[in-house]
Image (spheres, rainbow, N blue to C red):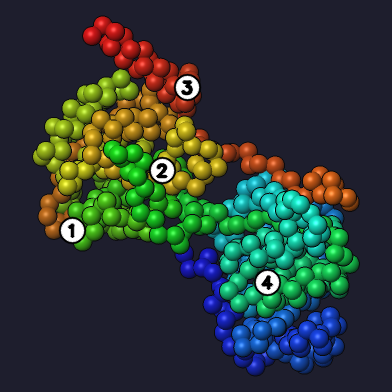
Amino acid sequence: MSEIAPDSADVAAPTVEKKSHRVQVRVPPPEFSSQTELHPGKSPGVRESLQPNVCEPQQVGILRGAAAYTKSYRNSDDILKHLAVAYLFTILKSPPKWSPETFSEIVAQESSIAKAPLETKLPIYRNDKTYNIHLSSTLVKGRFVTPQDRSDHVHLSIHQALSRIKRGKAAVWKCDGHFFLIRRLLTGWYFYTPSLQDKPALMFFSCPQLMVNLVQDTYGCTERSKYFLSNVVLHSVEEGDVVRIVWKMKRSIGMKLLSPLEAILHGNIYLVRPSLERSLEIGLNVLDRAQQDRTKPRSWDNKLLNGCFKRVETHWKAAERMACFVRDKSEPNYTIGGYTVTCRTSPIGHRQRKHFEEMVNYFLASCTALLIVGRDCCFVFWARDSFMYWFSPYRYSALQERPEIVQSRACFLHMTNALAKASQSLYEYLYELGVFPDSTIELLPVRIEDGSAHAPILDDGDEDSLDQEGLTIPPASEQGWTNFYSPTLHSPSELRLARQMLDMVYQTAEDRCG
């Protein structure tokens, strides 16, 4: 996703003298510096670039809006929404390319979420995509200068707190009732404020000391002033029927070992809702990559798994027609584009796990893979090099995981060398989706002819008060995993717990009788 790539490279470019509405201030050495130079009295004809010259250690770039905002922004919810939109604009549009009209675009975009309640997850719809901004409550708090005689180091000075912000990350900065957005770069800091001399402004600072000096001198903050920092991050982007988890997209993550018998690989993309056609298409993409000898599935990473969600015309056409065959149930087998569904199985229910394992053992000896279809969900199961794999394009959940962890889960590839472990994990997952116990699953053995999978398919205040203030944002209403198909009587978690208890009673009875 190129549109959400970090823009620090843009900042590192050398200064180019050209016509623009930006003013660049070269700050003299500290013994000669004065804050009046941050707002030089230059005429509109003086136009310099916002991009800093990395050769000069102290530099400030200023871009101001053409007019003041009409909204007062006295309500903390309003200002936090405004800063969230401003943060999104720093990602979608590189700050060196901003213009005075950009500030008006921020206000216009903010009006679209004006009535939305402020929660930790703030969706912003723009250009046919929904950007999910995650706001956190206060993470770091303290005073601008922390007394040196404090025995406990609970609270940090503002310089210590700013140094802990990682490169590329952003935060909401509250100082004595004033709110700012800051974002750290390799070469400095971006600083956004809705009101600098009654106009919005975006500034670049080559060092945080200059930024702190501006806040103290312009907004009246003293050394005893309190500050609060909270994270703001673009968590995910919803586009069409898929969701991309953005905040960890650039990490290259491989298989994670869960136990001596199993490992799992999480991607960063997942389907929003069940779709037989789309899940079949993605499953065929996965099978196509799994059959290639260049990279074995156990050495895949999340980048490769994410690539399986790209649209492939031949796979899409095959998936459309294969979905019609799955729903029709009148034909016993089907062949299209190099894929042959050899037969159908009778429906398998939630109490037939042993029967499921027997069917898998029988079919994997003669076919390439198994399509596991439950209602509108389709999963792929195959074996290679003495390992068994099953893939799901939907999010993965588990009872032992915290809701905030589940939020970052996406599609996954499960790997094990024990069929019993694979079937147990699959069945538990089908309970979480809500397919079990009210519905059944069907196995469709698929054979792929060598070299023909891509065959063309014809169209058919004081110290104590510091702990009582800060940013308190209510959690999002939809935390954790929600199953697609709600069971008739009980939740998936209740049914899983009951099944586990019955298994324990059964095993105990067997041990005693044996």
Of helix, strand and loop, which one carries label 1?
Answer: loop
Callouts 4 and 1 close, C-beta under 8 Å: no
Tell me what residue is drawn at x 63 percent, y 38 percent.
477
- Callout 1: few (<14), some (14-19), or many (20+) C-alpha neighbours within 10 Å? few
Q: Nearer the viewer, residue 25 or 365?
A: 25
CA gap, disc 3 and disc 4: 49 Å
Q: Nearer the viewer, residue 252 or 426?
A: 252
**Among the 4 quarters of the image, the one containing residue 498:** top left
Tag count: 4
Q: What residue sits right under mark 1 in the picture? A: 293
CA gap, disc 4 and disc 1: 47 Å
Chain-order first, disc 2 or disc 1? 1
Q: Nearer the viewer, residue 70 or 308?
A: 308
Q: What residue sits right under mark 4 in the picture? A: 190
User: Of discs 4 and 2, which sits in the foreground?
Assistant: 4
Tag 3: amino acid: Glu
Q: What residue sits right under mark 2 in the picture? A: 394
Chain-order first, disc 3 or disc 2? 2
Q: Is residue 23 left or right of residue 364?
A: right
CA gap, disc 2 and disc 1: 26 Å
Q: What residue sits right under mark 3 in the picture? A: 494
Q: Is residue 326 left or right of residue 109?
A: left
Q: Is residue 499 left or right of residue 119?
A: left
Tell me what residue is drawn at x 79 percent, y 54 percent.
150
Tag 2: amino acid: Tyr
Chain-order first, disc 4 or disc 1? 4
User: Of discs 2 and 1, which sits in the foreground?
Assistant: 1
348 lies above or below 397: above
